[in-house]
Image (cartoon, grey):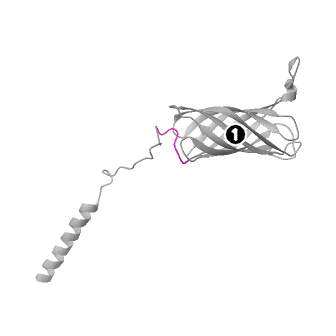
Amino acid sequence: MIIVSGITYSLHAQDQTQNQNYTAPEQAQASEPADYGNGLYHPCEFSVDGSVVGILHEYDFNGNGLHRKNYRFGGDAGANFFFTKYIGVGADAYALDQHSPSFVDTATGNLIVRFPIGPVAPYIFGGAGYQFERIDQLVGGGGVGVEIRLVPHFGIFADARYLAAVKTADFGLARAGVRLSF
């Protein structure tokens, strides 16, 4: 009887101790980082994007205006990672509609600084890359853009950049597309 009473008392004491340390899932509250914001743009965010690209070289202009035969279109794929809500890095590669020996015409890496204001996030970026099209060469430059998100994991964006080339004429590039963030 004493042994059974001791075991019962011991089990009851353990149960009381566990109940004092246990927090039900309904009562637990996960805290978000201070700069997590409204959930549309947040730190430690990874995103992938796809877009259409338009390229315009400086020699596409003359005294009479634009020579449309030199304006080229293509597609672009990219990935970004934001360390904070405001600062991140990105990489993208695009291919044009012409027949070139390499599938990727130019690949670039950029430092990105964005300024989220509600669902809209204007951003600036700059970096360097490599052009495989026609003449292999280094390129570098920067640009501006804007992303709009009405839901946390899907947005649309547009940006424009100026790229300075080492061996050929400088050129401009504009993109518009969709972005999925995780």
Q: Main secondary structure of the magenta part?
A: loop
User: Badge 1 is on which residue?
Assistant: 126
Q: Is residue 42 magenta?
A: yes
Residue 119 picture location, percent across and down: 52, 32
Quadrant that contains the N terminus: bottom left
Magenta stretch: give its range: 38-44
Residue 8 picture location, percent across and down: 16, 75
Residue 93 picture location, percent across and down: 74, 44
* Nearer to us in this view, 126 or 12: 126
Label 1 secondary element: strand
Residue 58 relative to residue 182: left or right: right
Hey, which quadrant is residue 62 in on the image? top right
Residue 6 relative to residue 55: left or right: left
* Nearer to us in this view, 35 or 75: 35
Identify which residue is drawn at 66% across, 34% down. 177
Residue 149 picture location, percent across and down: 55, 34
Q: Is residue 165 magenta?
A: no
Disc 1 residue type (three-letter):
Gly
